[in-house]
């Protein structure tokens, strides 16, 4: 396996999806110099190596000068990929079923913006059993050391655990409940540049009836708390939030704007079709106003 600085630099360029010209522009050096680094003709000076390291660290949190001394296997792990540049499998779930370019994009996005989505969230969605009523779940998003976003949903005795992939303006999640042997899937609208406070999207899961009937619903997530960075403490916060939650929202507690947003997605389109148009999304960050349908009163 190649171990030279040139091989590691070429891996960095591949992972960060940046050309030699792009790196040269960012470092304010001639592109031919970057070409010589990548070919192994010369090694960068201490000054240029520090600048390259700073450039990488802005995109790969925790990256340092010492990482260049690692063997190619551990060096690639720091970047969150395999030595050949393909997406690395994540402990607890095999991502071979996700196309490598898609997973690579999700990993890069998570490393750059995933921290903004970390936290505790409370969902609001229509009840499947009680027409006109709404229910809540507790969700937790955590970014792991490998960059992936872990996704958990809990209510009463149900615990779904899985992964979230950040792709363009959406968050695609898949999770499973080992106890019941069921899965859930969701697509939520994300927030660009800002720290998200409200997200909305669609969920697909099975009902807790005898046949495990499939059911889809529109859902809005409100941020209700931040994480500590200590996995054990964060898990405790997650369980405490579930324990203190009344899954069935009291009548009248859900604001009218939010009710309209969640229910119109079933009535303003073709029968049997559920949608949540991006142009009608209430997803927002901390800098936006508090007059959206997603804002609790």
Image (cartoon, rainbow, N blue to C red):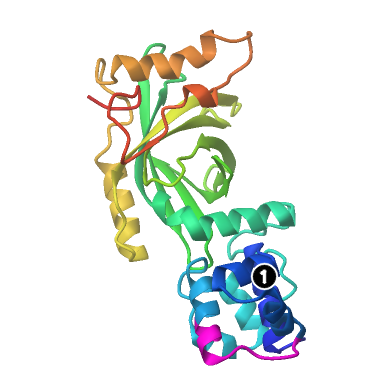
In front of the other: 98 or 117: 117
Q: Pointer 1: what residue?
A: 13
Q: How many numbered badges does the structure rendering display?
A: 1
Boundaries of the magenta span: 40-50
Does residue 157 appear anywhere in the picture?
no
Q: Residue at x 68, y 67 (%)?
A: 21
- Relative to 117, say whether 183 is above or below: above
Label 1 sits on a secondary structure element that is: helix
User: What quarter of the picture does the C terminus occupy?
Assistant: top left
Q: Is residue 269 magenta?
A: no
- Relative to 100, say whether 70 is above or below: below
In this rendering, position of residue 64 left or right of residue 198: right
- Relative to 118, say whether 147 is above or below: below
Which image quarter: residue 236? bottom left
Q: Residue at x 72, y 80 (%)?
A: 38
* Residue 257 x, y percent position in the rendering: 33, 16
In front of the other: 146 or 253: 146
User: What quarter of the picture does the N terminus occupy?
Assistant: bottom right
């Amino acid at each position: 396996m190649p171990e030279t600085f040139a091989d590691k630099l070429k891996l960095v360029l591949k992972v960060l999806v940046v050309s030699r010209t792009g790196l040269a522009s960012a470092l304010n050096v001639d592109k031919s110099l970057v070409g010589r680094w990548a070919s192994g003709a010369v090694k960068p000076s201490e000054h240029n190596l520090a600048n390259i390291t700073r450039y990488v660290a802005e995109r790969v949190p925790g990256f340092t000068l010492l990482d260049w001394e690692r063997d190619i296997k551990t060096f690639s792990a720091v970047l969150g990929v395999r030595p050949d540049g393909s997406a690395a499998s994540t402990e607890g779930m095999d991502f071979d079923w996700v196309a490598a370019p898609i997973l690579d994009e999700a990993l890069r996005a998570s490393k750059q913006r995933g921290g903004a989505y970390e936290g505790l969230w409370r969902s609001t969605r229509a009840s499947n059993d009680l027409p006109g009523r709404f229910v809540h779940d507790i969700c937790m998003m955590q970014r792991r050391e490998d960059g992936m976003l872990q996704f958990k949903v809990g209510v009463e005795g149900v615990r779904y655990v899985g992964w979230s992939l950040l792709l363009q303006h959406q968050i695609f999640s898949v999770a499973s409940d080992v106890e019941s042997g069921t899965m859930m899937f969701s697509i939520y609208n994300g927030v660009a540049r800002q720290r998200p406070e409200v997200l909305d999207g669609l969920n697909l899961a099975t009902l807790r009836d005898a046949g495990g009937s499939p059911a889809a619903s529109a859902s809005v997530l409100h941020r209700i708390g931040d994480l500590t960075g200590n996995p054990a403490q964060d898990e405790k916060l997650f369980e405490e939030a579930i324990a203190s939650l009344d899954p069935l929202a009291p009548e009248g507690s859900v604001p009218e704007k939010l009710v309209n947003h969640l229910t119109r997605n079933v009535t303003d389109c073709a029968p049997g079709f559920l949608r949540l148009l991006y142009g009608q999304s209430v997803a927002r960050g901390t800098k936006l106003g508090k007059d959206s349908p997603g804002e609790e009163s």
